[in-house]
Amino acid sequence: MARKEPKEIFFKSLVSAIVIIAFGSYLSIRGSKEKTEFESVTGRIDYFDKTFQEINYRNKGNHRFIHIEDYPLVFDVFVGKETGDFSPEFEQLDKLKVGDEITVYHADETPLQRNSDLRFNKTVQFIDKGGEAYFIRGSKDKYGGYALCGIGFVLGCALLFLKRTGKIK
């Protein structure tokens, strides 16, 4: 029986593993930052809704939509109330109302979010009103980043093993 020629996928696959590790590192670092390390915007709420009609098909009550006067985007805050959701550590957003002055701390968009709906900022990390916390992000970024780093590492090790055994080149 003729032996199959090894496939030439090592380099592209190794680059993919490195990209996965880099993105995982970015997420885990972002998930570990303190509140003061994020960009912030302070202003009065001029729009607050938990059933934004245009995207309600995916909402299911797990999002809050908040707009601050003179800020160009609507903040889309995931509050995850169902089993298995990556819920925030602390959340009492339903106590906010139009006219309240709040400070929203948010991160830069990830490369995967840059092509999403440009009307929304989905990177809210913290929300304060009068120095009191109303939203504190959960740990999904930190642990998701760790998971991606682990997957990238295992993929890299598997690729090195396959290359050494001659299965790929």
Image (cartoon, grey):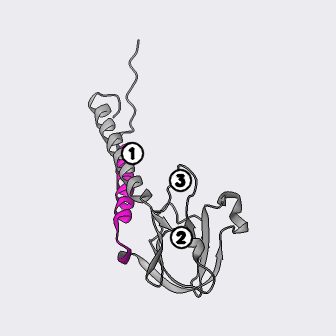
Instruction: Point out residue 106 in the picture as x, y percentages from the top left corner.
Output: 46, 73
Give the Cα distance between marks 2 and 1: 46 Å
Front-most of residues 159 and 167? 159
Position of 96 compared to 23: left or right? right
Instruction: Point out residue 118 in the picture as x, y percentages from the top left corner.
Output: 59, 71
Q: Secondary structure at mark 2?
A: loop
**In the depicted structure, whether residue 136 falls above or below residue 87:** below
The residue under label 3 is which amino acid type? Asp
The residue under label 1 is which amino acid type? Lys
Residue at the spot of label 1: 12
Residue at the spot of label 2: 92
Give the Cα distance between marks 3 and 1: 34 Å
Q: Closer to us: mark 2 or mark 1? A: 2
Front-most of residues 85 and 70? 85
Residue at the spot of label 3: 85
Q: Secondary structure at mark 1?
A: helix
Front-most of residues 72 and 162? 72
Q: What residue do we see at 57% from left, 85% from top?
A: 100
Magenta span: 13-36
